[in-house]
Amino acid sequence: MNWLQRLSKTGRMEKELDAELRFHFETLVADKIRGGMSEEEARRATRLEFGGLTQLKDDCRESRGTLWLVSIVQDLRFGARILARSPGFSITAILVLALGIGVCTLAFSLYNIASLQYVPVRDPATVVRIQRRSPENITPGVPYASIAYYRDHAESLSAVMETMGGPPLVLNQDEKRISATFVSSNYFSELGGSAATGRLFEATSETAASAPVCVLSYRLWQQKFQGDPSIVGKTIRLGGKPATVIGVAAEGLASLGTDTPDVWLPILQHTYFVEGSKALDDPKFDGLIGMWGRLAPGATMASAAQELLTLTNQLRTIYPTVIWDHEYIVVTPGAHFLTFESEPGRPPVLEVVGLLAFLILAIACANLGGLLMARGAGRQREIQLRFDLGARKLRVFRQLLTENLLLGLLGSLAALPVSYGVLRLVLVYSNAPAWMSALPDWRVFLFTSVMGLVAAILFGFLPTLQMVRRKKNRSLWHQFVVCAQVGASCVLFILAGLLVRASLHALYTDPGFGYEQVLAIDPGMSVHGYSSAKAQSYLEQLQTRLRAVPGVTDISIARVPPLVNDMVMITSIDVDGKRVMIYPNWVGPDFFKTMRIPLLRGRYFQNNEKNAVILSESLARKRWPNDDPIGKQWKDGKDIVIGVVGNTRAMEMNNTDATEIYYPPGADDFPGMTVLVRAAGDPGTLTPAVKAIAGSIDTQLYPTITPLTAGFRKNVAQAEQTATIISLLGGIAIFLAVVGLLGLVSFAVSQRTKELAIRLALGANRIAIFAAVLRRFAWPVVLGLVAGITATGLLSQILRRILYGISGLDPISYVGATAILVAILGAAASLPIRRALRLDVARILQSE
Amino acid sequence: MTIPSKFELPQGTLDLLILRVVAQGPIHGYAIAQRMQMISKEALQVQQGSLYPALHRLENKNFLVAEWGPTETGREAKFYRLTEKGRTQLQTETESWERLTGVVAMILEHPLGEPS
């Protein structure tokens, strides 16, 4: 019989045990009556003979191995009673645990949604992502020509799907653009997607030659067309190209990867929607076409990778310049939102987040441990009594552990709604796909319960052991706990201060350039396959015509316009073995004037100048701390430094240490250029004129016009969000520190109740007593602060490399955070002492 | 010859005796105690406190199985019955007990002061 069966049969066994013993009892009584006793006498005699019935039952249970079950139920019931008796402690403990476990559960839930749960598509286990790798290269995309070859030849794949993000498209005449993804015609049928109205693409019906069509997302249909069902069959203009709406995807339709576009277009019609595109024809096109497959019955990811490698080697003879040396194909599970692959050089995001979450749980547990120890001191008498009544050590220990376990599980239970609520907010604010649900699944339940058990062991084991052993020698351990707690809180608190200050302060100081009156005009030439010459002539025309617009003061071009680009480029140099990260940009001669970036030394670029670079002051100082940089060679190349300009935080708003390097544009840079226009007054008044001019030069293009202030606002909002999250974590840290210290001081006070009472009785000054108790805590607190500050100093140097923008040793953060921490700790510590001073002296002295 | 009214059974002996008594056919706890008392001519009084834990232990080891059934007085009682496993156990235990008592007897009956 296994324990589960035993558990289910326990109830019946109990009943049978009772009946069996009763039978014996009654028979004995009947015998005695037959022997001439009165019934009453017989019963009394039998009862005496029988002894303790409860003990006998216990022995029977023990001999069949069900005793532990009964006693656990007893322990749980007892534990629940104990917890209910001191609701203050229980609620605090559960709250502390809910926070600690909640943070872990939230982190795990996010990971679970992104990487463990399947995206709701048909037969998700056989959907795979296919990517190219070589020892030197990593790319998520596969050229279309290669995909076609794999599709035709791979036997381990029953279907191949493609997805390709398109440029943002103008919908009809709207100002705001919509996102589009090009997908293969079998995309929806292969994934089992359904339409809210109309139909989706069908495997054979959409071709390059057939009439241009599109499928709207449910979101776009609701927002732009108010859910109008008659939209099906109508023609809309996407980027100026007419296309027939054939249907709307269902609300909960899941797409592959993180892609949630507004509209889906057939990839075979790519050249129609993006005129001049070479995506499908040029085998060297390295744009991001994602390749997905469905494993044929019997095929595994390993066997598919093996077959695709063979096919890749065949492809090398067809496109020798396309296939890399030692290229291989990786096949990974495809039906997950995000996958974290173990690539070398991948930033350890997952590990760092996991570690931080666990750290918070550990701190919560440490503090709760302190609280528990304090309580243990108060329960000394109760436990002593139980020993005196003959309880075994192990039994008491087990009972106390059960109590902790109960607390841990209650904490887990309380953590679930905390994590659920926050997760819901996160999903709503991040515009998550409709199929994502914040509701915990079995993995989250399991994880949370395990965390509750882990927490119970972390916070409960040592204090419980101490309680059972009734050790008096706790002071060293106790002081160590104070020290560790203060240190850990200090780290969290200062880090929070640093991060908040870094992200907010940097924003509200001068960014180093003038953005308020500047418009960025992105013609989007590169996606339309513009050649360098064609782009250059377009840019020249555009600039000439814009210069004539009244109110325009300066015009320039830049490859990476500040604030409005979602993607920035980063390069680096080594200076004396230290790596310096640099933001490069390719700009026209008037860029600095347009952006109001001051020239500090040397000169600006001239027209068509080559082999010259301009450095930001910070970069010049890092590269040549003691020399004049003008005229020096940059790296080992032919580029000569001709000027030094002011630092800007254009590429990374919250990094005051950012360094920049500016190059004159090379021929390849022109198709990717953005035009920057500075207005004398409000740049918004220029928009219509700019739009008219930009559109009229080449009707094929639909330029995006964005005021830089919009980008700035977006940056501020992001930074504020980050700061809010960090402050929240800091708040949790403070709360935990307060709870922990409260517990420890209560503990110390309760240990010395008698001494305090005697002193009070002898008429000691209350303030002197106050100071005497606090003095015990002085040096562990100071030691903890010193350790915490040192650790933060070291940690911030490491964090700096992960999160730019922290001036790691900012004195205000350190002094401020430490001062607030000390004040809060002081207040927390004085609370139990004050309570102790109100003690009834006579009662305490009597009770001793 | 007076027999002490109570004496300690050696460890594990009670199990053997129970198996032996139950081997005669289905029997409930009370009757087991009665029979042991009778056979031992009142020398052995098995206490409920040791009898029932032993019964449950043997049942848990699958040496015994129990069924509820009516007694001669019409009351429902729990009747224990020997399993195949119990029967084998009884046999091996009996043999080892006989060997043990034999050895113990040999030593005890050896006349004092006589070289072996």
Image (cartoon, coloured by chain):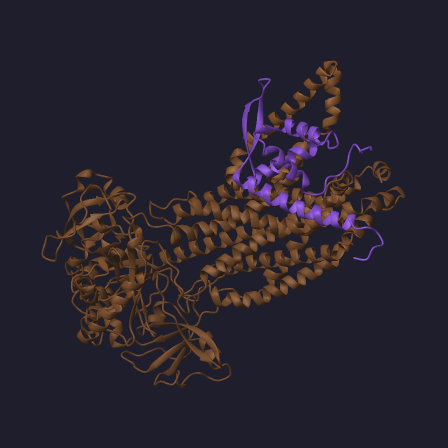
Give the answer, above or below, for where A96 lies relative to A274: above
The residue closer to the viewer here, A447 or A401, is A401
Residue at the spot 20% in from the left edge and 56% down from the top edge: A184
The residue closer to the viewer here, A772 or A537, is A772
Residue at the spot 31% in from the left edge and 76% down from the top edge: A664
Chain B palette colour? purple
Which of the 4 quarters of the picture holds residue A343?
Answer: bottom left
User: Farthest residue toward the right?
Assistant: A762
Which of the 4 quarters of the picture holds residue B51?
Answer: top right
Which of the 4 quarters of the picture holds residue A24?
Answer: top right
Q: Residue A586's x, y, as percent?
A: 32, 73
Q: Residue A508's x, y, as percent?
A: 48, 59
The residue closer to the viewer here, A562 or A519, is A562
Chain A palette colour? brown
Residue A76 seen: no
Residue A101 seen: yes
Q: Residue A737's x, y, as percent?
A: 63, 51
